[in-house]
């Protein structure tokens, strides 16, 4: 173990300064680590990097062991895409500008890879590079079996911009779905905290009033097929995993084709597809180049189901219109009127 006799020249010097003056290879971080583990000693007494040494003391410290640099991760090269994969991805594009690309993701295609998933959007983004020097970036995701609008950022600046919009809930998303049965209320807001269901390995969510994270979804009934099924428009106000699927099941109307949250009862007879009937229909979001407002056509299996159930697609008027100018300040109400309206809202919320 190295040691030194402190001279008059170093009388009163701090331990870290002593190292800097005589042993610059011993950094402050190293000295701090030795101090925390009691390996710095002055006349046998433990000292730290901020303590001062006195002339005549015998100062000891550990041998400086060479640090082994951690091996750098080897960057794996992506397998070049086939012409068929490139054509497949480019056929999904429904909007493109200098900042963003929007694709209509088909059902059954994962957004990102995972265990047992080798084909996914993220793995084929090279096909959407076009005239840019880098591939686009994912800024949000859709479940594998959910189809529809998926936004990609073409630059790092746009990615940060969009991520902020999603995080602050400024982006407006609308989903179309078919539900089993008809919701009791034609429109409303589902307010039910969500958490990972114990024992599911994080693959399933559940309503958990005690420990769940806040989750809110607005909905409205667009059309219905007797009491058999309904065409419902959902607008999530938060972004929890499987939020719409869990909330739909929570009000007694699971999505058609959603065995995970609706069980075998979620499948309709009469030729209705067994695939999940949930589609990200519309996205309205601000962009560095202006507002993006895009709608994605329904996948084939949902079009067929709509036709079998007799739904008219022209009924799907957007549930919201994102304002382009600041909203005017609301008119002040009298205390009596204001109180009545608050009471009405509370009673509606209780029925939902």
Image (cartoon, rainbow, N blue to C red):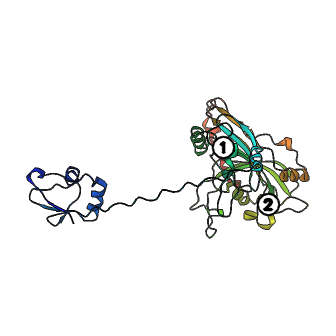
Foreground of the two, 95 or 86: 86
Q: Which residue carries the number 2 mark?
A: 257
Q: Position of residue 197 (x, y in %)?
A: 63, 66
Q: Position of residue 81 (x, y in %)?
A: 71, 50
Q: Residues within 10 Å of mark 2 (few under 14, many from 20)?
A: many
Q: Quadrant of the N terminus?
A: bottom left
Q: Position of residue 28 (x, y in %)?
A: 28, 53
> What residue do we see at 81% from left, 42% from top?
316
Q: Which mark is residue 45?
A: none
> What residue do we see at 11% from left, 60% from top?
57
Q: Is residue 336 above or below residue 89?
A: above
Q: Residues within 10 Å of mark 1 (few under 14, many from 20)?
A: many
In the image: residue 35, left or right of residue 352: left
In the image: residue 239, left or right of residue 253: left
Q: Which residue carries the number 1 mark?
A: 152
Instruction: Tell which tag, 1 or 2, sits nearer the viewer.
Output: 1
State yes or no: discs 1 and 2 in contact (Cβ < 8 Å): no
Foreground of the two, 249 or 273: 273
Residue farthest to the bottom, as pictured: 199
Is disc 1 placed on a helix, strand or loop? strand
Q: Position of residue 143 (x, y in %)?
A: 70, 55
Q: Quadrant of the C terminus?
A: bottom right
Is disc 2 placed on a helix, strand or loop? loop
Measure the C-alpha gap from mark 1 to mark 2.
28 Å
Residue 274 visible in the snapshot: yes
* Among the 4 quarters of the image, the one containing residue 133: top right
Q: Is residue 241 above or below residue 39?
A: above
Foreground of the two, 154 or 185: 154
């Amino acid at each position: 173990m190295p040691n030194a006799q402190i001279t008059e020249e170093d009388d009163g010097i701090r331990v870290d300064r002593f190292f800097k003056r005589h042993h610059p290879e011993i950094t402050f971080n190293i000295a701090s680590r030795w101090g925390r583990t009691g390996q710095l000693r002055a006349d046998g007494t433990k000292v730290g990097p901020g303590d001062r040494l006195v002339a005549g003391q015998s100062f000891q410290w550990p041998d400086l062991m060479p640090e082994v640099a951690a091996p750098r991760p080897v960057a794996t090269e992506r397998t070049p895409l086939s012409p068929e994969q490139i054509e497949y991805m480019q056929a999904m594009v429904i909007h493109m500008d200098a900042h963003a690309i929007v694709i209509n993701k088909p059902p059954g295609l994962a957004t990102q890879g995972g265990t047992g998933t080798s084909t996914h959007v993220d793995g084929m983004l090279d096909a959407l590079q076009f005239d840019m020097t880098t591939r686009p970036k994912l800024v949000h995701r859709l479940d594998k079996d959910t189809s529809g609008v998926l936004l990609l950022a073409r630059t790092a600046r746009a990615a940060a911009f969009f991520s902020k919009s999603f995080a602050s809930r400024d982006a407006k998303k609308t989903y179309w779905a078919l539900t089993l049965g008809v919701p009791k209320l034609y429109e409303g807001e589902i307010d039910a905290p969500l958490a990972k269901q114990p024992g599911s390995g994080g693959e399933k969510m559940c309503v958990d009033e005690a420990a769940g994270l806040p989750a809110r979804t607005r909905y409205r009934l667009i059309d219905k097929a007797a009491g058999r099924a309904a065409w419902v428009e959902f607008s999530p106000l938060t972004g929890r995993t499987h939020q719409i699927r869990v909330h739909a099941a929570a009000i007694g109307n699971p999505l058609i084709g959603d065995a995970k949250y609706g069980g075998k009862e979620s499948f309709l007879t009469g030729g209705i597809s067994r695939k999940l009937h949930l589609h990200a229909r519309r996205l309205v979001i601000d962009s560095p180049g202006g507002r993006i407002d895009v709608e994605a056509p329904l996948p084939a299996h949902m079009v067929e189901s709509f036709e079998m159930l007799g739904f008219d697609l022209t009924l799907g008027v957007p549930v919201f219109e994102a304002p382009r100018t600041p909203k005017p300040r609301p008119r002040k109400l009298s205390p009596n009127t204001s109180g009545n309206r608050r009471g009405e809202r509370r009673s509606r919320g209780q029925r939902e």
